[in-house]
Amino acid sequence: MPKASIRRRLMVSVLATQVILAVAVVSLSTYLTRWQLKGAFDAGLRNRAMSVAAAVRYTEFGKPALKFFPESAPPSLDKGYPDLYRITDESGHILGTSPNWRDDAVGVEPANPHWNVMLANKHYRGIRLVNLPVLDEMEPGVRSTKTLTVIYVASVRELRHRVEIVAMVTFWGSVILLTLATLVAVWAIGKGLSPLAALATSAKEVSAENWRLDPPPLVARTRELAPLVTAMETMLATLHRAFTSQREFLANTAHELKTPVTVLKSTLQSILQRPRAVNEYQAAVDCALEDIARLEKLIHSMLRLARAEQAAMDSAKYNCSAVDLNASCEQAIERLQPLAEANDITVEMAASNGDAVVNADPDDLDLIWSNLLENAIRYSDRGQRVFVRVTAEAENIVVAVQDWGTGIPADSLPHIFDRFHRADTSRTRATGGYGLGLAIASAMAESYRGSIAVQSEIGEGTILSVRLPKNGHPIPENIEGS
């Protein structure tokens, strides 16, 4: 399929508009000229018909006999095509005619006093004046009551010739103006599209090594391209973050996998260096199994994260049912109670009094609460408590997990949901974390059109709030932590 051209489309549109305008100008000017000349021609016909009527006089004073004097008639408008006229009195008696008079010049009796007729393949126009008074005096100071009817027909060749001249002048003038306008339009369109071409050239410079869109000043000064530039810069920034995150994810994954694999390899190599006792083999195998368990846990977390992120991108959700978040949180607390007791942490919960039911996969929700609770327990000092609050809003359910632990530094807050991110690397290493728990929780919440937010201060603790929409209600955008 051939590619469409914006330049060609604009050119065709401009040219079509100019052609329509030129045709309209030629047609309108020709019509107006013909209308004006026709009006002037009809006025001239009337005057000539009146002049012919004035050539009718009485033969003698006191006698009612009328006579037409042709020598007093006006000359023809077009010498090449003599005028035709006929004069009759009120009784229909013909008083006089032109030498070239033809009865077919009258044609069908028209309702309009003017008419057009073809004579000898030539165009003529006629006028009929009725009830014209006789201008000659029957006696000194006495006018007759007799009336005249004058039919006057003249050639319109000169009129048509003038109309044609006007039409041709207008046509060629329009062609010249159309040509000039087209040339100007070509230049203007090229000039107008040059910022777009400059933007395309600038976009070609974007690569995996250069994520910066550097539009030239011509693009920056173009108002219509400002939204496009903003959208492109936003898209590139998003892609850069995704690319960087993916690259960091691969590097962190390799690093996390390298440690247990290296330890496992060292353990196996040390076993093979010399014969050992059974208890030594047993201890080495136990150590290897611990490393394999650590490796298995990491791979399992990575798979859950990948599935959660894929679910966030897909619109369809499976295995969903109505889940009461009060009961879901209580089950997660009960399952993590041994970990809390081992760290001397008290876990409390305030259930919602209202409807706290959402449509979701129970296993997904259980994974979210488990990750949040495990983080809160591991980052709290011994003897502290963790508080879970479920709140029902108009369209959403908010589950907040609060601890009074060490808190998270302000510079780490924007990154706590990144994969493999650790706000306190030393403590996470000591507790065996990988930095994937909050990333999994965030991806799971987003897969249900929800969100997760954080509030934290050093030395005062952290609040992680998950907001999920009730059944049939979409989650509002740009939700702040509560």
Image (tube, rainbow, N blue to C red):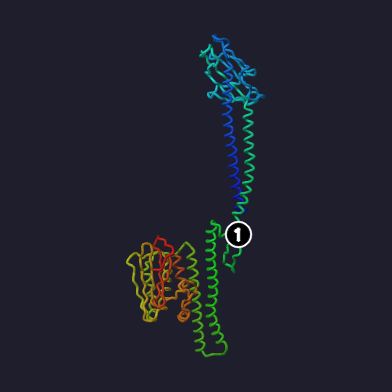
Q: Which image quadrant for residue 373? A: bottom left
Query: Which quadrant is the C terminus positioned in?
Result: bottom left
Q: Nearer the viewer, residue 50 or 240?
A: 50
Residue 46 lies, with reference to residue 314, above or below; the image says above
Q: Position of residue 312 (x, y in %)?
A: 47, 65
Q: Where is residue 44 in the image (x, y as percent from the top left)?
A: 58, 25
Residue at 62%, 27% in the rendered image: 156
Question: How many circles with numbers are drawn on the protein?
Answer: 1
Give the quadrant of residue 382: bottom left
> What residue do we see at 63% from left, 33% from top?
164
Of residue 158 and residue 139, the one placed in the foreground of this image is 139
Q: Report the residue that reaches farthest toward the front.
A: 140
Using residue 53 as the reference point, say whether residue 479 is left or right of it: left
Would you place residue 66 above or below residue 464 in this image? above
Residue 387: percent from left, percent from top? 36, 74
Q: Where is residue 73 in the image (x, y as percent from the top left)?
A: 61, 19
User: Which residue is situated farthest in the right direction here?
Assistant: 80
The amino acid type of the residue labelled 1 equals: Ala
Pick the residue in front: 378 or 52.
Answer: 52
Please rate how many residues cluster around mark 1, counting C-alpha atoms within 10 Å: few if below 14, some from 14 to 19, many from 20. some
- Which structural element holds mark 1? helix
Residue at 59% over, 32% down? 34
Which residue corresponds to mark 1?
A: 198
Q: 312 or 300, which is in the foreground?
A: 312
Name the residue: 45% across, 68% down.
Answer: 444
Outermost residue toward the top in this view: 63
